Amino acid sequence: MEIIAGRRALAAGMLGLAGLAGARPAAAFVGPRPECLAPSAPGGGWDFTCRTVGRLMQELKVVSQPVQVSNMPGAVGAVAFANVTSRRAADNNLFVATSTVGLTQIAQRRYPGDVDRVRWLAMLGADTGVILVRADSRFKTLGDFLDALKADPGGIVTGGSSSLGGYDHLRLLLLAQKAGIPSADLKRFRWIHYDGGGPAVTQMLGGHVEVVSTDLAEIAGFVEAGQIRVLGAMAEARLAGSFANIPTAREQGYDVVGLNWRGFYTGGRVSDEHYNAMIAGLKQVYDSEGWKEAARRSGLQPIWRSGPDFERFVANMVTELRSLSQDIGIIS
Amino acid sequence: MDILFSLAHGFAVATQPVNLLVAFIGCFVGTVIGALPGIGPVNGIAILIPLAFSLDLSPVSALILLTSVYYGSMFGGRIASILLNIPGDSSAVVTCIDGFPMAKQGRAADALAISAISSFVGGTLATVGLTVLAPTLAMAAIHFGPREYFALYVMAIVIVGGIATGNPAKTLAAGLLGLAIGTVGIDPATGIPRFTFGAYELYEGIDFVIVAIGLFAISEFLIYIEQRRTGPIEQVPVGRRTTALRQLTYPATSLRASLLGFVIGVLPGAGATLASFMGYALEKRVSDKDGTFGKGDPRGVAAPEAADNAAAGGSLVPMLTLGVPGSGTTAIMLGMLVTLNVQPGPLLFQQQPDIVWGLVAALYVSNVILLILNIPLVGLFAKLLTVPSHYLMPGVVTVSFLGVYSVNQNSFDLLLMVGFGVFGYLLRKLSIPLVPVVLGIILGTPMEQSLRRAMAASGGDIWTLVESPLALLLHAITACVILVAILREAGRRRNAAAVERGA
């Protein structure tokens, strides 16, 4: 249905002036010139999300014009966010790639505006947060580690691929909170930031950092090679395939889900009709074999959340991350 | 055997038609860049990086392009040295000493052939060294923690910055300027913006490509306008070779100099310029029994050329294995690799063997291409020196603007580039060297981050920096280098004062 309606709207858009097309009441996926905005440089993570989804949309004929991917790097997505909220709030051609990283920035008030300035479309997949140690580590379970951390909060060197207050750091703190470590002690953790999960794990193998909190995909090779032990995965349930033997944090009694999801938002004044059509288009991508393959290759678990459900999820996440950031003094 | 297997795989990558083509183009363009006075390898590579992006090359092809340009410019650098007595780049300075006298004696073609052959020997031996040494060093790199990296970066900045060869105070000032510029943008440790004045354009920091093109290319243009150089410079004609090629190889000289050059190149920090000086000095000490050096001795051409090409190969070792560049040019290549999403360091060898071994194999290929290009075509390259500056310089500026704009399609970057061009012009007027500024920017961030990591790991205890033997050793080497530079500067002043008193 969406496809047929889309074609009609497209025809109408091409007949009228291009600028008027956006005002046409039609259930098109997007306007005549679909555009995915990647708030990163070419080659970055958000760029990959845009290019993959854009390609699939064209292959699946969700759109009749190729999706143009434009890059607007700057301030971890703040530049793109500012641009969308100020100039393109009603642009139904546009969807913007984002992820937990961008949301953490919003939670810490580093974007010009809060979550309600844009409309959250959907998430299509997520990377799973994991807590890692060396294979010969003294910690055998998540409990061992968190108990030791509780006894001596400043005594263990931890690290990951985000800055202090970034998501890798925050989800470790969420675990610590569940272990009953008081907020005042959370600030005493030693946290080393690395440029990625790979460098962090290499440094862990060299003995320069004891525990690493990061996403699974980038370091999966180390896990398969048996060089490192995964103390816990912050997923809702056990992972599939070769990672099925990794215990979740939840089953070890620490109910934290730390997913680094990939998804999209659009302008805050895009009409319900276009908003729903965009979601329907993304759902087609999500349901395709092509997406499952792309997700598998980049280590993502396909996970679908959309519309009001996704907006609630985003709002809850921001509330949680914001209060945690305040607890540890990252923001006031 | 593992290495041979990997290398064979690398040759499969390097001999793909697109990569061969890219290597050929890179060698040709590199020789041209090296030959043209004013556009050194740093400059040439900085201009070509945006081009590599706009061609949408794969990371390995882009890397092959830039390294073959790098090797090519090492070959080309000596053409102007020999024919004009003007070095094409800083590492070709020494080649003037014996190359130009040879040319004046009517042996220009011989000198050019000697330098091509010994460059080939140096480059190839260094690539062999890279093949053998890099994987081992990559495995040892696991022992490098934050404090060892910090020590390494400090050493790199101090030595590459040229404290060993220039005025220490001005070099220090230049390096500190670079470090200061490098702090602009979001702090990776805490995610908080610094010195951005609320401008989102500055949140990602100032791109080294913009700074490098501004400082080098634009300031060169300003200097050109000021001096109004017109027309070509007088040059010695190339002529014909007077000696058979076989007699122009000087194997012992090339071998000695290559070995020395490679070792100097591997040391993070010391680059091709230092290697060419040391290679010449060593050869003079060993071979100059009749006092022919400086009067057109062929070995005085062979030694620095072998040494600087060997150093160019050697400096790729720390860049690929540790992510610490061994020279100004590799520093810029490192910046580009990161932009291409290739993270140099120990993981590179495990995760992206195609890139590493494809590159290594491409280096062998490039050396052969360069030798083939340089023996018969040297007359053509020599012709380039006659292109009048008033055609050349506007071309360079045009390419610079296109290049910078193509990175982010952002006009702010162009303003920034011009700003840095004017800044570079002022620095040159004050004879403050430019390379340390760029180095400060490129190395400043990782150096600061290593320091921050070391501090985070130790809970803020500064003594952790010298508690590891490896870090201590590296700091000691750095201290020695600084001490030697200070003593030499003091000696120079004393001599100058003595001369004045005497006069």
Image: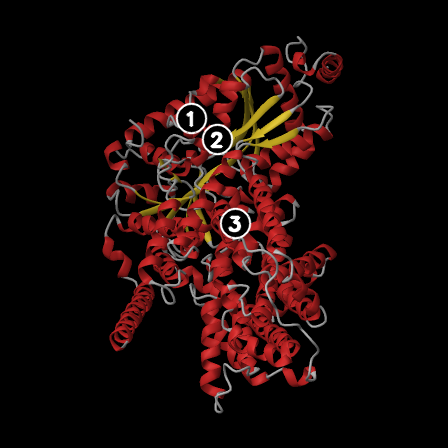
Q: CA distance from mark 2 to mark 1?
A: 8 Å
Q: Residue at x 40, y 51 (%)?
A: B427
Q: Say which of marks 1 and 3 sits in front.
A: 3
Q: Which mark is residue A77?
A: 2
Residue B56 in percent (x, y) is at 65, 45
Q: Residue at x 60, y 63 (%)?
A: B35
- Quickly name the residue at label 1: A111
Q: Give the mark, 2 or 1, whose residue is nearer the N terminus.
A: 2
B230 relative to B445 in the view: left or right: right
Asked if disc 2 and disc 1 are in contact, CB closer than 8 Å, the reply is yes
- Give A118 or A82, whichever is nearer the viewer: A82
Q: CA distance from mark 1 to mark 3?
A: 45 Å
A203 relative to A80 in the view: left or right: left
Chain on which label 3 sits: B
Chain on which label 2 sits: A
Q: Which amino acid type is marked by label 3?
A: Ile
